[in-house]
Amino acid sequence: MPGDILVLDDEKNYLLVLESILSDEGYKVTALSDPEMGLAFLEESEVDVLLTDMKMPKLSGQDVLEHVKRGYPHIPVIIMTAFGSIESAVEAMRVGAFDYITKPFANEELLLSVTKAMSFAKTQQENILLRRQVQERFGPDNIVARGKPMRQVLEMVQRAAPSKSTVLISGESGTGKELIARAIHNLSPRSSGPFVSVNCMALNPGVLESELFGHEKGSFTGAVSRRRGRFEAADKGTLFLDEIGELSPDLQVKLLRVLQERTFERVGGEEPVEVDIRIVAATNKDLQQAVAKGEFREDLFYRLNVVSVELPPLRERREDIPFLADHFLEKFARENDKPVSGFSAAVMDYLTAFEWPGNVRQLENIIERCVVLGSGEVIEAEDLPPEIKDEESQFKSAVDLLPAKLDLAQTLEKIEAAVIRRALARSGFVQVKAAELLGVSKSLLQYKLKKYNISAR
């Protein structure tokens, strides 16, 4: 586990001894007698652990510590101090020093402290790398949003993220609600804190209560020790409550209290627990309708719905489908080490025409299937599952998505407009070809384009 250590001490004899001891253990050591040079070195070089004397001219060990905590909080600092100055070392520990050792020290004491600090530093570096990877994956730059509906969503996300307000994300299953929740977290001042996700529909109410709030030892059969819940795990970060519409009435009351007071009790406990969290919730239900039916508390709904983000279904953002398909193709080709590079024109026609009742998640699954089972460098129509190519199935899936109660005339107009848009897309927006696909004259098509305000590009 050797790494890079910076040692600061104005006593050159100590510098020589420290450099010798640490170098013999395999560490790469930079030993400097001038603390100002040390701070300059930090700006240009990688340092895993910093070892500094407390009393030095120009800058004290306390000054060095404060500078490192401001600019390089991931670097653990070990303070060296004379026996008579232990109080100042204890104060340094209070403000963030990793450890302190007193001069003169035994070699074993020094090496034990450095080993612990180095282990901590490596863990911090791994966490930073993991957080960076998560931010790259779930950042707004990695969300496909070529069309206007999703661009508007991302604009809302970027405006809402820096605030402390709760956010309610609504949309059909498979539209990417957790992806948007992570983007909000990653763009917020809490991005360095935890992002904790809970699916409220996956657990029964009794288990969910313990999962959210934790429990005390002996609070129920099987509670053999105290357990922290998701609220505590999300302290200083974001708690994502998926399928919030499935909460039982009792849990709705308890969640409302947390939102109002920022405190709760563990199951079986009486001591209040304070948390500093931001709540982002998601639902595929119409919560206003649930409130009207008495299934969801009105006061909780308004607490959650401070900022509302509504995700459009995939069928309403068809311009994004080719880009989403390419994104998933590249991802699964890389993961499966397969030389797949694109789609045939026929496949893209099928993908853009399909209604996608399962939304982006369904598209992702279909592309993964095609990559895994396909044998060529290009995904062909025969690689698609039957339901994507069968027009009768497509029509049935589209009809199934319609509400039970509807205005027939308005619905037929919407269907006609959707069919015209599909024909334009399939014809490369050449009106003559689109009219041929629809079996109508060009003049009738132009009339319909004007009627439905459809751009023919």
Image (cartoon, helix red, strand yellow):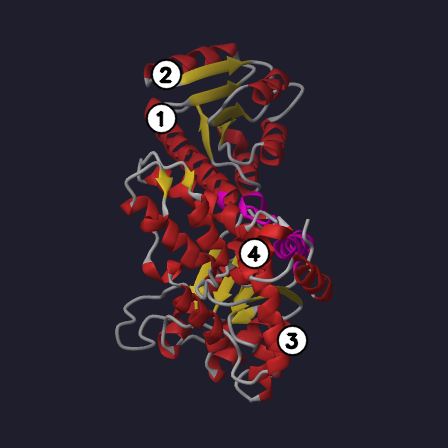
Q: Is residue 401 above or below residue 141?
A: below
- Give percent across and percent down for residue 456: 67, 52
Which region of the structure is painted magenta?
A: 137-164
Dot 2 amino acid type: Ile
Main secondary structure type of the part rendered in magenta: helix
The residue identified by callout 1 is 111
Structural distance between the alpha carbons of marks 2 and 3:
63 Å
Disc 3 and disc 4 in contact, CB within 8 angstroms: no
Query: Who comes first in sequence, dot 4 or dot 1?
Result: 1
Structural distance between the alpha carbons of marks 4 and 2:
84 Å
> Disc number at residue 436?
4
The residue identified by callout 2 is 21
Structural distance between the alpha carbons of marks 3 and 4:
51 Å
Disc 1 and disc 2 in contact, CB within 8 angstroms: yes
Q: Is residue 321 magenta?
A: no
| Element type where label 4 sits in the image | helix
**Other-residue count near label 4 (Cα within 10 Å), few / some / many at <14 / 14–19 / ≥20:** some
- Give percent across and percent down for residue 205: 39, 78
